[in-house]
Image (cartoon, helix red, strand yellow):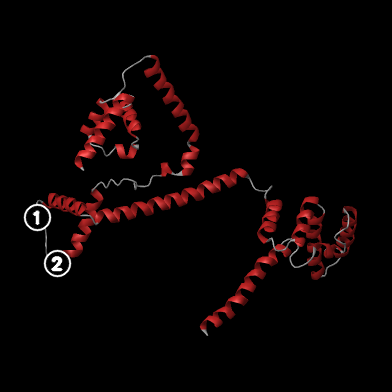
Amino acid sequence: MEASASICWCIPTLILVVSLLIQPSISIYCDEDDCYDLLGVSQNANASEIKKAYYKLSLKHHPDKNPDPESKKKFVKIANAYEILKDEATREQYDYAIAHPEEVFYNTARYYHAYYGHKTDTRAVLVGLLLVLSGFQYLNQWTRYNQAIDMVKKTPAYKNKLKALELERTGGVTNKKKGNKQINKKLEEELSEELELQIKGAEKPSVWELIGVRFILLPYTLGKLLLWYGCWFWRYQVKQAPYSWEDASYLTRRSLGVPSDSWRYVDQSTKEDLVQRRLWEKPNLDSYLAEMRKESKRRR
């Protein structure tokens, strides 16, 4: 019984939705009227006949000659119909919409592209798109960051670190009274702000990482990149100078395929050991990877 009742409700709803979707495809040009009927011409009329019919009707219903409010509305509809039919491209689109009313989205897209596409500044569209994407990106970054922070605050390591910082600030004395629970909670919030939470893959959002900002700074970034490559080529290819610590670290992490964010969390002694191995040279890298495979098998 309930199933049949649901079907009875679904069918009228579906019909209503379909009718609402199909109607705009037919009436998007001249509302509920037919553009040809408004001008009193047939669909096979040529441009001269359409123009003649428009001028005749416009003189009859022009607000300066006919003060009737209904006549003014008629004049607006006639002018709109003529704007559609006088242009071959828009007329062809209108004829197609009449012949294919079921192609709702296609007809609607063609209509708005014809009437508003040429009026839209591409630069404004690009700026708006970058702003929207940057806004979504910024919100997503903050959401990921806050979720990661909440997860870290539940770990024992974070709680122990927070407790150690509390003991350091209070001189080794902690207040365990239940009445001071709210005070302790406030103190915990203050202490958590002092802790530098470094979470891989969920760094604190920065405006400089947004798509829009990066796009604006793209010329500067490309210029800086070309300058960097030029200096690199001159220093190490032409002059054959020894690699600096920063450049040797860059070559090392690139050889190992380690992202720059992950490289920051590697301890200094490990970095020094890897750099001294000169892993950017293929024999040294192969030897190091072989050692790592042996070590992994030994631990198993």
Extreme-bottom residue of the structure: 1
Query: In this rendering, would 58 be left or right of 203?
Result: right
Q: Quadrant of the C terminus?
A: top left
Report whether 177 appears left or right of 9. Answer: left
Q: Position of residue 7 (x, y in %)?
A: 57, 78
The amino acid at mark 2 is Lys
Name the outermost residue toward the top: 239
In the foreground, 78 or 275:
275
Image position of 171 (left or right of 199): left
Name the mark on residue 228: none
Per the image, label 1 sits on a secondary structure element best described as loop
**Mark 1 to mark 2 CA distance (whole Å):** 15 Å
The answer to which of 59 and 143 lies nearer the viewer is 143
The relative height of residue 126 versus residue 93 in the rendered view (above or below) is above
The circle on residue 173 is 1
Between residues 286 and 108, which one lies in front from this camera angle? Answer: 286
Name which residue lies at 51% across and 83% down. Answer: 2
Residue 180: x %, y % from top left: 16, 64
Q: Amino acid at mark 1?
A: Val
Q: Which residue is mark 2?
A: 178
At horizontal 19% and vertical 52% (from top left) the residue drawn is 162
Residue 101 in the image: state x and y as whole percent: 72, 63
Q: Which residue is at a point 43% across and 24% down the rendered structure image?
A: 229
